[in-house]
Amino acid sequence: MTARDANGPDSALAKSSGRFFVTYLLRGLRGRVRQVVIVAVGLAVGVAALVTLTAASTGVSGAQAAVLHSLYGVGTDISVTSAASSGGSGSSGSSQGMITRADAGKDFFRLPLGLGLLDSAALATISKMSGVAEVAGGLGLSETRAGPAPASGGPPSLTSTSIDGVDVAHLKLGPYAAGTITSGRSFTAADAEADVAVVDAGYAAAHHLRVGSTITIAKTQFNVIGIISQPAASNPTNVFIPLGRAQAIAAYGGLHTLAGKLTAIYVSAASASAVPAVHSKIAALLPGATVTSSGDLASKVSGSLASATKLATDLGRWLAAAMLLAAFALAGLLTTAAVRRRVREFGTLKALGWRTRRIVAQIMAESLVTGVAGAAVGIGLGFVGAALIEAIAPTLTATVALNPGSTPPQGALINGGSLKTLTLPGGVHTISVQLHATVGATTILLAVVLAIGGAVLAGALGSWRAARLRPAHALVRVA
Amino acid sequence: MYTLTHVSKTFRARGRGGTVTAVRDLDLSIADGEWLAIQGRTGSGKSTLLQLLGGMDRPSSGTVALTGRDVGAMKETQLTGIRAAHIGFVFQTFNLIPTLSAIENVEAALVPLGTPSGQRRRRAAKALAAVSLADRAGHLPSELSGGEQQRVGIARAVVKEPSVLLADEPTGNLDVDTRDEILALLEKVWTANQLTLVLVTHDSTVAARAERVAVMHEGQLSINPTDTWIG
């Protein structure tokens, strides 16, 4: 025997065999199209489930953030509120909030239902915390105006206007930031003590207001400088005025002075990663307050968004994992079975002098191509699934107390002899959000890695089996 | 070429426990360029003997020496290299790769040798022409008859110009006319390439074509000259 005993020089072997490698690979895939398609489709279904459910989960997270931003503005990462004290939200006028004929023609102010007061001194402390980019305060009020006493007797009619005092130096924070000026102008820092107002578009239309009109709040004339369109919600603020003016007019009508008082603090963190730390520091600074970020808003929200969140995180996560595992198992079983059927083929190649590692490489390459095909189809199906979810998903609603997490103020309804308790409308926000199921780059990358990984694992199982066989055993097995 | 000394091969019996001895204390010498036929009934151990000669399995005891080198003591990679360069196989069931064309099946035998692709294709085409299948080079095995598939198998076995050709029941799946064609082809290849041919068969007509016939019975071998073969 000559020096030909050993295998050919490595470089020549590699070059020559590379072309045949590709030929054998392509022929093999073409000759076993049905099996390749079944394995690829199995992987694709698992990948599609992962992509679709991840997109839905991302959409739900986005909807939660949209709820927070609808309530407190796009720039707000954390809101701080407090629960109303047992003494009530503070109001003037008749005791227990009941209006009688004697109150005709009067104005009454109260804080929003369920909300208590915070001290604006906290603003300075919070602004100095590391991780805080910006902080602003807000004061919500409700003005109830009693009409004239009816000639027929009974209490006068009531009209209510919700008012929000805006920190004009920090317009990117708070519910005001969630709206869009559609006419006129927004506040400037120079408006801090001015009697100017920006009015909600719906309220303006209902009351025939436009830029340049005047509205009366606490017997004071406010000049309308802008009209604002706000996200759909059950209780949008009707009128925005500068914070200092809101604190001052609250004393009108007998409501104790609100100088230096707030109903909400809005915080913008320096980065998303700083939010948890800032959250903790504020909670430590104000132990009696409710500190809310979009991450923990989910536990304080009721409505269909809450149900969707639970569905996406609980069922969705496990369903995606289960489908992916099933896809891997299917790919592994089918590939192993296919390799078993090809034992004679591999035994023949060994008899021809093919090294085990070359045979293993062929099997792995076939599996890799199958995995890539499965990933591509799966990602495509995932996009379709995400689009379907977005198309058919109903508008989600999120109901949250003005002080998130606390029990909204309850009232009683007597109807046909029965007494029912119900949540007072003014004590909650109900936000409508649309689910946007988006497929992110990270999800796509994960899907590709999992599909290819699953296929390669399946190929490895099969080729390990084939590699262990001696040529004689492989040939005898099939004879 | 080959010297076998006290060679035995034992297998574990599946399901029943115990062992099965396929080859029993066998001594055999095969000269360079000789055509030896090993005849015997099914289960006599002749295919096992062929696998030992081809380095596809190792003896349980004894030595199988190929040009003085103990095949049983070699590493798997060495055996693979020897099969790649020096030993050609022809199988009863043809064993063509079903997804490769005729010429690609022949080329597969040259891949382990690092033959450049252009040269590989030319040699494969020449080998197919030598077995009168040049016009079927692009056909898949499923598009070829049994005889044509075996011709491809022979072309694949000889394309690398081996020193040894081992044929395991090469005509076992063929009709009488095709059997004779294949035997004639093997004889032509043996003569033209001056290689050592060991052919295993149960058919005495096939065995009779060889220079020398050995008969296997229950794992043991007896040598007879062709004019006194046992049929």
Image (cartoon, coloured by chain):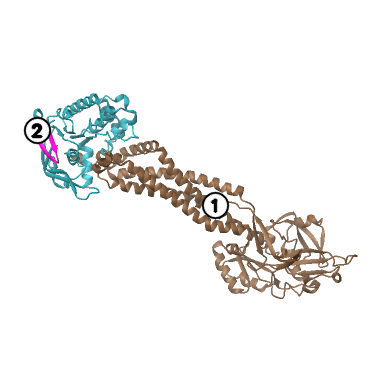
Chain letter, colour cyan:
B
Q: Is residue A277 above or below residue B159?
A: below
Mark sitting on residue B85:
none
Q: Are marks 1 and 2 on the same chain?
A: no
The answer to whether B175 appears left or right of A261 in the picture is left
Image location of residue A255, percent across then percent down? 77, 73
The answer to whether A146 appears left or right of A467 in the picture is right
Q: Is A130 in the magenta? A: no
Find the distance from the CA under tag 1 to the CA under tag 2.
79 Å
How packed mark 2 is, by other alpha carbons closer than 10 Å (few <14, some 14-19, many 20 or more), is few
Image location of residue A124, percent across then percent down? 64, 72
Count every numbered label the image shows and give the total.
2
The answer to whether B151 appears left or right of A383 in the picture is left
Q: Look at the image and tell me whether residue A236 can be seen.
A: yes
Chain of the residue under label 2: B
User: What's under tag 2, amino acid-wise?
Assistant: Asn
Q: Residue at x 27, y 36 (%)?
A: B109
Q: Determine which residue is flagged by label 2.
A: B224
| Colour chosen for chain A | brown
- Residue placed most toward the observer, A407 or A131: A407
Span of residues in magenta:
B213-225
User: What's under tag 1, amino acid-wise?
Assistant: Ala
Q: Is residue A43 above or below residue B110?
A: below
